Image (cartoon, rainbow, N blue to C red):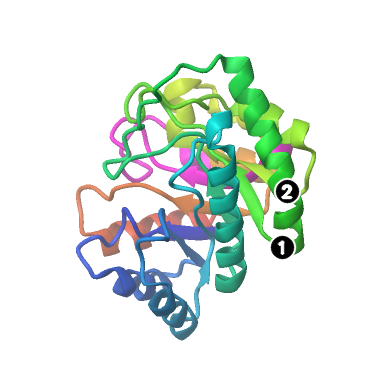
Amino acid sequence: MEFSCCIEMIYTGHPFLERIRLAKEAGFDYVEFWNWVDKDIDAIEKTLKGAGIRLATFQGSIRGVMVDKADREVYIEDMKTSIAMAKRLGAKAVFCMSDILQEDRSVKPRAVPIPPEEMKENTISVLKELAPFAEEAGVMLVIEPLNTIVDHAGYSLCSSREGAAIVHAVGSPNVKLLYDAYHMQIMEGNVIDTIREVAPAIGHFHIADVPGRAQPGTGELNYANILKALKDTGYRGIVGFEFTPAGAPDEEVAAGTLAALKNI
């Protein structure tokens, strides 16, 4: 497995571009971030090449709601642009959110409720339309279930099994599940058994401990066993560090956690 550093949460005491260089120095294979439309893409591209580190993933559409048929056109338009940007930057994946996350990462309320089955159908339909563009670009689209208890109340997709069912219904090798163990521990528990169940659908993996969303070792999750189980399923993709370092400087936490997990 390879490892990615989310530079939205780690090294935040440094300028954004400097975080890319710090991730490389720590030994990460990739970096990842959230929105791309508010960033200096030319500078990011230059810094990635200069540092010799790759881009794992970033967020696609920030305007439309994937589960809402009324937003279908704007969502697909934004995602096509994001797929093209991922190809330009050499990113492995674009992650697709079911709803709009606002600047503080809260979910933008929808004006009209949508029945769950309709939301699922809309999601499958959108991803089926986007899949050929992703396949042609050599970019993976990953859908991410989030927790609605602590961080993202009102978010539509909050089950890894539901996410895996959507992936299977779309039926494209370039549409996969982003399994975030932090979010899914809060929503489902039984992380190892669930990973084994949905493993064929997983295309990207995020880690953080529970509670608190800090680094592994600060909470209740045994990441040595979790990553061993993930590896045993045959997963050889990217494990993303999407946590807020606690108890020590970011540089120390990131490097120490990476060294420990690379030995699994």
Taking the spot 35% from the left edge, 41% from the top edge, the residue there is 217
* Closer to us: 219 or 20: 20
Whether residue 216 is in magenta: the answer is yes
Q: Dot 2 corresponds to which residue?
A: 131
* Closer to us: 180 or 68: 68
Quadrant location of the N terminus in the rendered image: bottom right
Q: Dot 1 corresponds to which residue?
A: 138
Residue extent of the magenta highlight: 200-225
- For the question of whether residue 1 can be seen, the reply is no
Q: How many numbered circles are shown?
A: 2
* Closer to us: 213 or 201: 201
User: Where is 131 relative to 81, above or below?
Assistant: above
Q: Please give the label number shown on residue 6.
A: none
Taking the spot 24% from the left edge, 70% from the top edge, the residue there is 15
Whether residue 203 is in magenta: the answer is yes
Locate residue 79, reporting x and y percent. Answer: 57, 52
Asked where in the image residue 209 lies, by quadrant, the reply is top left
Taking the spot 35% from the left edge, 61% from the top edge, the residue there is 38
Cα distance in 3D space between marks 1 and 2: 10 Å
Tell me the kind of residue under disc 2. Answer: Ala
User: Where is 50 relative to 107, above or below?
Assistant: below
Locate residue 63, reporting x and y percent. Answer: 44, 45
- For the question of whether residue 69 can be seen, the reply is yes
Mark 2 residue element: helix
Locate residue 4, reporting x and y percent. Answer: 48, 59
Q: Earlier in the sequence, mark 1 or mark 2?
A: 2
Mark 1 residue element: loop
Taking the spot 30% from the left edge, 39% from the top edge, the residue there is 218
Local crowd size for mark 2, using a 10 Å CA cut-off: few (<14), some (14–19), many (≥20): many
Which mark lies nearer to you, 1 or 2? 2
Locate residue 102, reporting x and y percent. Answer: 32, 40
Tell me the kind of residue under disc 1. Answer: Gly
